[in-house]
Image (spheres, rainbow, N blue to C red):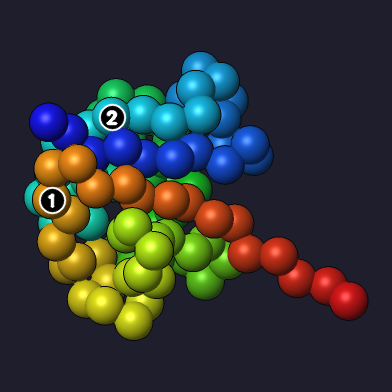
Amino acid sequence: MAVIVRIPTTLRPLSGGAKQVEVGSGALSEVIQALDGAHPGFADRLLDDDGALRKFVNVFVDDDDVRYLDGLSTSVADGVTVSIIPAVAGG
């Protein structure tokens, strides 16, 4: 099995238009690197220069925000869904 990564509309050009991509399991950082390996550009869009998640990107493992788990060290098992959700601001 693999991990399913749901891709938001704004990032679908990087995935060739795919709504979701399957990659190997591991820590979230490894999932992001696998995603970037298969579809270059994701790491630049999701991670800042220090390798941390960008503030305007929310990542959920199943239904849990990784900022309240172990961040990039969050374990992502086979069969789990990772959702990338761009932050929405304004009023």
Place of residue 3 in the rendered image (x, y in percent of width and height, measured from the top left): 23, 39
Place of residue 87 in the rendered image (x, y in percent of width and height, measured from the top left): 63, 64
**Residue 14 seen in the current view:** no
Hey, what amino acid is under mark 1?
Ala
Whichever of callouts 1 and 2 sits on the residue coming sooner in the sequence is 2
Residue placed under numbered mark 1 in the picture: 77
Q: Is residue 22 above or below residue 61?
A: above
Q: Quadrant of residue 78?
A: top left
Of 24 and 44, nearer the camera is: 24
* Residue displayed at 33% across by 57% down: 62
Q: Report whether 16 appears left or right of 9.
A: left
1 and 2 marks in contact (CB < 8 Å): no
Crowding at mark 2 (Cα within 10 Å: few <14, some 14-19, many 20+): some
Residue farthest along the top direction in this orientation: 16
Hey, what amino acid is under mark 2?
Glu
Query: Which quadrant, please, contains the N terminus?
Result: top left
Q: Report whether 53 appears left or right of 58.
A: left
Q: Quadrant of residue 90?
A: bottom right
Residue placed under numbered mark 2 in the picture: 22
Residue farthest along the right direction in this orientation: 91
Q: Is residue 74 above or below residue 15?
A: below
Q: In 3D space, how far apart are the residues under numbered discs 1 and 2 (Cα atoms)?
A: 12 Å
**Residue 8 seen in the current view:** yes
Question: What kind of element bears circle 2?
Answer: strand
Q: Report whether 49 appears left or right of 85.
A: left
Q: Is residue 43 above or below residue 27?
A: above
Place of residue 80 in the rendered image (x, y in percent of width and height, measured from the top left): 24, 48
Q: Quadrant of residue 33?
A: top left
* Residue displayed at 17% across by 54% down: 76
* Residue displayed at 32% across by 47% down: 81
Question: What kind of element bears circle 1?
Answer: loop
